[in-house]
Image: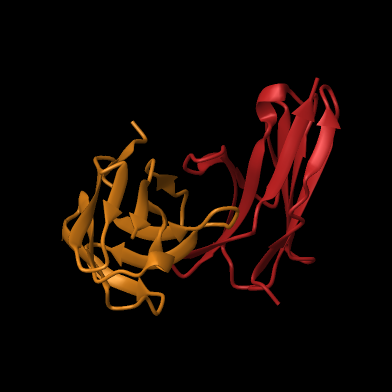
């Protein structure tokens, strides 16, 4: 079993749609969690950190469920520019393990 | 400024060459990382430096040799690489090894 598992997609959604990604992690000692966005042939860029209390940044909402060991990302009102690969990551003991990434295509 | 810089952007090398990748950050971060990323795969951790000391080596072959000359710089020395080592090599840094990692733009390496 992989340490961090994500549905690779692709998710094909129309503009304006709401889309949700989930990610599960197996290391219960993981302490920090993140969502990154990676565009084709570019480096990952931090989208948001994930906390148990949940956090929201504009159209993006992230949530951590420690009991079930998963993190989620909700994107509301999808834009064409949201098309990218979304990577979840969990960090413990200096190591960040990334999920395989979920590919999102937003279409007009 | 959350910038991590990497040079070169692209590198083509033969299997007998020796080359180095360079990474620099001026955010005062004390942890720096090297990742390898193949197409359509997530970044895979290679090395972690914390306070200029090697903390993690993820069983990386010895043809990859990291070096941390000071708290702002991280190098990756390459020697006798194989074609399967062709990938995007990403450097990252974080404040303390647990927080947010900021990635550089990467070096795209092709080994012939």
Quarter occupied by the C terminus of chain B: bottom left
**Relative to the observer, which residue lies in front, A82 or A61?**
A82
User: What is the residue that sits farthest to the left in this orientation?
Assistant: B69
Percent x, y for residue A7? 77, 56
Compare residues A103 and B84 and report the one nearer the observer: B84
In front here: B56 or A86?
A: A86
Above or below A63: residue B37: below
Image coloring type: by chain
Counting from the top left corner in percent of width and height, residue A75 is at 76, 34
Give the farthest residue toward the top. A108
- Residue at 64 percent across and 59 percent down: it is A99
Image quarter hosting the N terminus of chain B: top left
Q: Chain A is drawn in which colour?
A: red
Quarter location, residue A79: top right
Regarding residue A97, the answer to whether it shows in the image is: yes
Q: Where is residue B13 in the image (x, y as percent from the top left)?
A: 26, 57
Residue positioned 24% across, 62% down in the render: B51
- For image coordinates 66% across by 24% down, the residue present is A81
Residue A32 screen position, x and y as percent: 56, 57
Q: Quadrant of residue A69?
A: bottom right
Q: Is residue B11 left or right of residue A91?
A: left
Instruction: State the count of labels.
Output: 0
Give the residue at x 56% y 37%. A39
Tell me the quarter of the picture where residue A90 sits. bottom right
Q: Chain B appears what colour?
A: orange
Q: Can residue B95 be seen in this view?
A: no
């Amino acid at each position: 079993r992989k340490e961090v598992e994500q549905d690779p997609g692709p998710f094909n959604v129309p503009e304006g749609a709401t889309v949700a990604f989930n990610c599960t992690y197996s290391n219960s000692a993981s302490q920090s969690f993140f969502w990154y966005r990676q565009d084709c042939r570019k480096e990952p860029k931090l989208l948001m950190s994930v906390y148990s209390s949940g956090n929201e940044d504009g159209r993006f909402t992230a949530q951590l469920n420690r009991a079930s060991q998963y993190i989620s990302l909700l994107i509301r009102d999808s834009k064409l520019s949201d098309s990218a690969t979304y990577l979840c990551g969990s960090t413990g003991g200096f190591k960040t393990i990334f999920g395989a990434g979920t590919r999102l295509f937003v279409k007009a | 400024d959350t910038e991590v810089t990497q040079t070169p952007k692209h590198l083509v090398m033969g299997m007998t060459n020796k080359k180095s990748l360079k990474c620099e950050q001026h955010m005062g971060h004390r942890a720096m990382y090297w990742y390898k990323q193949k197409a359509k795969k997530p970044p895979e951790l290679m090395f972690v430096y914390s306070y200029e000391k090697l903390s993690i080596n993820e069983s990386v072959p010895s043809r990859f040799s990291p070096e941390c000359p000071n708290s702002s710089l991280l190098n990756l020395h390459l020697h006798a690489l194989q074609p399967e080592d062709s990938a995007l090599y990403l450097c990252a840094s974080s404040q303390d090894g647990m927080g947010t990692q900021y990635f550089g733009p990467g070096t795209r390496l092709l080994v012939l």
